[in-house]
Image: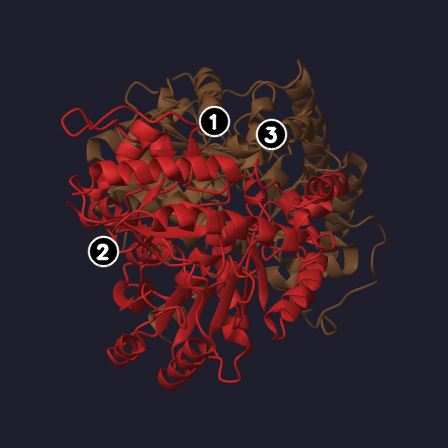
Chain colours: A red, B brown
């Protein structure tokens, strides 16, 4: 295999969320136990934007964008100036630290676009990049695409609620060993763990001490459950000089169909990101950019209501899952992911995921996507119809009991 | 400078089309001649979608997409299956060779997204990539981003109408020298030259002989002027085994605000492109994908009318420009670009471009963006209001005469 073939072999997407339709049907005949469980199919690989619909006013804002014509279709690569000005103020208020509309903010095709641009702006061939395990699957794959080198840092997210559980000594070792970029999601995807103020302060201190750049993916930071505290790294007095924060309205706000994300932070890095965007996608879709006018400007009470509805689903699903012997799952402090660790099973975890689809019409994302230590887990995005989600998880629980050792 | 700094320094976008608003105003005091020329500002750096409006029905198709909800927001990474099936048939009919909806077609964020994914799927660090000079500015920059190596192939587009003017012996030398990827736009951007059937047949034969992969950007191939013939490389009997064709509805169809592109061809390459899309932008914007239903299905006569309107503008501008001593410009056979070679000037070409904005309210793209041999040229996208374009080019001509030696 030549290096390019090797690289793309590593970039497998067969098990990535949403790609299940392209999988060849595994032959499960020899492992099948019992009959299928009837119920409404639920695809937990992503949120259901029919159950939690896009922000009120989003489509109207898009329509106004189309009517505005060329000035909205062709924006600067980093996004329309007036929108950047509007968003810079809102993002500064949300995160507790200033955002420069002109120099420090870029609109991107989805928050994933932002993450790609940020990582490509900060890491090249051979560079060591510290990433968390488990964390968002693209982090690892982007490091590989850039011919850079993964330096893993463990997140011990189970058995502790006071902290996300980052192994801070491993992070320091990564920096000591030469990593000059650290990428992490907060809240953590897939576990929903939120980094404590102590953890954030330590990350800031270590990054500064070792002159490291930090990219923090805060995609789910608005969907914060009752009683939880969220600490924005960028507002830390010690925040690293080179810091990019990634967000977007695809999750909490259900605007994924418009493909919008933002990155904000260090001007020199945002500059690089724009240069790269100019040759990989030009800009966030012009008309879609107009939808960002609704972001952080939702109707009063809308966000609170959305959080409460998610919290009710979260709690209902946790109650079902925790009733199954051997299942371990952390209570997510933010976001809409549950990361479920299976008890010892009679089938491989990957096979169990296939069985869930085959026998229970339930789609989940295998834990192996998020890191090498979580192959015995799977992720659920519980931003779904409440009753359908509960019933689907009841079927999941029944199958865990059916296939466990 | 570390390698990453060097790379991003090379990826300058200050003179890229649409970025003029971010340029620092050059001090032109010492070179100014005469008074400003009054007239409606015209931005020739891209098409004016207010003058040539989006395809009829585009917005309606988008609206239906939004109403379809989750199934349209979350598609496979390579795009919604039913749309791929519809498009595969239309693209096969247009290009004269079969397209596999399931294995050989991907929807992307703009045709630029398609170009990036295709090039990244075919070239890695150190690989030699043959690209045309002049050609679309992103080609060169993408090679640089991928740490690959540019092998230039000249296009002698002036002084000959029978062929685009590709130096075929240089292309063969590039393959002999080790290049295994050739990337070109047809019609050529920025000149509007269309490759002759002989040239296409030779490209096919050489690529096959040397086992090279070809990426052909056919973005403007629908806007073909009266009496011209267009040869699709993929329909050649000798077409290379590894071939990706890039198109999109951003230009002729004025749908740039929706950020849509497609790539179609060799299944193994489309697979790689999907794997990469899964970590750089996920998918073409879900709701926007629905707009592709209108593509190649426009109302009867719509395309013909659009072509004729562009041809009238083309001919009017050519008449103005050719009346100026020393100006050289090829008659574009397709697309809406004019690439104008200046006579000897008293100011640097880059300064003249700045003067056009300053004294004539006319924005053009400097020739240096397209290759090192065309610094004395500039590109006009004449998809503009007819009268405004003619008047703007009259001002351009007046300034050429004012500043020429």
* Residue drawn where x is 37% and y is 20% of the image: B235
Can you see residue B132? no
Which of the two labelled residues, at mark 3 and mark 1, occupies the earlier sequence position?
3
Q: Nearer the viewer, mark 3 or mark 1?
A: 3
Q: Label 2 marks which chain's residue? A: A
Q: Quadrant of the C terminus of chain B?
A: bottom right
Quadrant position of residue B141: bottom left
Q: Give x and y (percent) for residue B203.
A: 32, 31
Q: Residues within 10 Å of mark 3 (few under 14, many from 20)?
A: many
The disc at residue A180 is: none
- Residue on which disc 2 sits: A372
* Marks 2, 3 in one chain: no
* Residue drawn where x is 28% and y is 22% of the image: B238
Q: Label 3 marks which chain's residue? A: B
Q: Label 1 marks which chain's residue? A: B
Quadrant position of residue B309: top right
Secondary element type, mark 1: loop
Can you see residue A357? yes
- Residue on which disc 3 sits: B65
Residue A84 position (above or below residue B273): below
Q: Calculate the distance from the C-alpha at mark 2 to the C-alpha at mark 3.
A: 38 Å
Secondary element type, mark 3: helix
Q: Give x and y (percent) for residue A314.
A: 47, 50
Q: Calculate the distance from the C-alpha at mark 3 to the C-alpha at mark 1.
A: 44 Å
Q: Nearer the viewer, mark 2 or mark 3?
A: 2
Secondary element type, mark 2: loop
Q: Give x and y (percent) for residue A224.
A: 54, 61
Residue A71 position (above or below residue A159): above
């Amino acid at each position: 295999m030549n290096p390019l073939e090797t690289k793309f072999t590593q970039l497998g997407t067969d098990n990535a969320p949403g790609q299940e339709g392209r999988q060849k049907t595994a032959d499960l005949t020899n492992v099948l136990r019992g009959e299928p469980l009837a119920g409404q199919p639920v695809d937990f690989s992503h949120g259901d934007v029919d159950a939690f619909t896009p922000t009120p006013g989003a489509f109207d804002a898009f329509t106004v964008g189309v009517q505005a014509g060329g000035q909205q279709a062709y924006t600067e690569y980093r996004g329309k100036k007036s929108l950047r000005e509007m968003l810079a103020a809102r993002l500064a208020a949300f995160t507790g630290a200033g955002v420069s509309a002109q120099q420090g903010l870029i609109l991107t095709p989805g928050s994933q676009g932002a993450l790609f641009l940020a990582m490509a702006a900060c890491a090249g061939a051979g560079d060591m990049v510290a990433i968390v395990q488990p964390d968002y699957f693209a982090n690892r794959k982007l490091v590989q695409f850039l011919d850079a080198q993964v330096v893993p840092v463990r997140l011990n997210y189970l058995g502790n609620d006071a902290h996300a559980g980052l192994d801070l000594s491993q992070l320091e070792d990564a920096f000591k060993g030469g990593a000059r970029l650290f990428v992490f999601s907060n809240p953590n995807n897939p576990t929903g763990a939120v980094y404590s103020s102590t953890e954030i302060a330590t990350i800031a201190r270590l990054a500064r001490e070792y002159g490291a750049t930090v990219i923090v993916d805060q995609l789910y930071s608005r969907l914060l459950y009752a009683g939880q505290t969220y600490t924005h790294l960028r507002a830390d007095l010690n925040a690293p000089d080179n810091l990019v924060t990634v967000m977007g309205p695809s999750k909490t706000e259900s605007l994924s169909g418009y493909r919008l994300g933002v990155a904000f932070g260090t001007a020199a890095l945002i500059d690089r990101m724009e240069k790269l965007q100019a040759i990989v996608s030009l800009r966030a879709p012009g008309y879609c950019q107009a939808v960002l006018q609704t972001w952080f400007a939702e109707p009063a009470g809308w966000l609170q209501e959305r959080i409460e509805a998610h919290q009710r689903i979260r709690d209902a699903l946790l109650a079902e899952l925790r009733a199954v012997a051997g299942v371990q799952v952390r209570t997510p402090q933010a976001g809409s992911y549950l990361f479920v660790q299976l008890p010892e099973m009679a089938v491989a975890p990957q096979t169990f995921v296939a069985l869930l689809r085959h026998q229970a019409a339930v789609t989940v994302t295998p834990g192996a996507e998020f890191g090498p230590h979580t192959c015995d887990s799977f992720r659920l995005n519980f931003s779904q119809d409440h009753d359908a989600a509960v019933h689907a998880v009841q079927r999941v629980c029944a199958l865990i009991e059916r296939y466990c050792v």
